[in-house]
Image (spheres, rainbow, N blue to C red):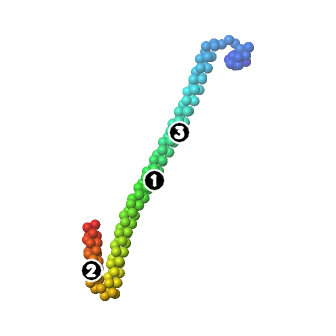
């Protein structure tokens, strides 16, 4: 039987050995194991950090795309508001002109030609003002 094997087993038959050497060897072994574990954890942490960094990049890209879409929708909404206002103004103008025309027809029907002439003149002024406003825009 090998005397080294006996000393490692701590058998009563084991030969005396250098306890100091055994302690330092054990300490070195534990330090190596601890260092190896630390290196493994550091490697795992680095890979986790890289993965997190990639995910953050994807999130930022997604946020940028959402922001762009939101700005496009906001812009389109503003354009629709402007168009709606223009349509409302045109509708009011049309209603006003129709009211004048209806009053002119009623005045002519009642043979009130003086009133019909005044209303026709007012309608012409209204149309001229609207045309002038369109030209300035």
Establish if 131 lies above or below 11.
Answer: below
Residue lying at 41% horizontally and 61% vertically, measured from the top left? 77
SS class of the residue under badge 1?
helix
| Mark 2 vs mark 3: in front | 2
Please tell me the numbered disc located at residue 66.
1
Q: Position of residue 6 (x, y in %)?
A: 71, 17
Which residue is the site of mark 2?
A: 118
Residue at 34% across / 81% down in the picture? Answer: 103
Which quadrant would the C terminus be assigned to in this image? bottom left
Is residue 2 among what the camera can see? no
Q: Quadrant of the rendered structure where residue 109 is?
A: bottom left
Residue that label 3 marks: 48
| Most foreground residue, 109 or 7 | 109
* Disc 2 from disc 1: Cα separation: 59 Å
89 sits left or right of 43 in the view: left
Label disc, if present, on residue 32 of the rendered structure: none
Dot 3, how many residues are within 10 Å of its Cα: few (below 14), some (14-19), or many (20+)?
few
Position of 95 relative to 81 (above/below): below
């Amino acid at each position: 039987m090998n005397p080294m094997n006996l000393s490692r087993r701590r058998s009563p038959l084991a030969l005396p050995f250098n306890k100091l050497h055994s302690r330092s060897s054990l300490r070195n072994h534990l330090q190596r194991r601890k260092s190896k574990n630390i290196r493994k954890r550091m490697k795992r942490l680095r890979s986790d950090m890289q993965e997190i960094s990639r995910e953050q990049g994807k999130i930022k890209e997604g946020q940028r795309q959402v922001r762009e879409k939101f700005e496009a929708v906001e812009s389109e909404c503003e354009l629709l508001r402007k168009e709606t206002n223009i349509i409302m103004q045109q509708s009011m103008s049309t209603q006003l002109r129709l009211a004048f025309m209806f009053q002119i027809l009623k005045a002519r029907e009642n043979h009130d030609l003086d009133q019909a002439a005044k209303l026709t003149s007012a309608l012409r002024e209204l149309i001229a003002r609207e045309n002038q406003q369109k030209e300035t825009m």
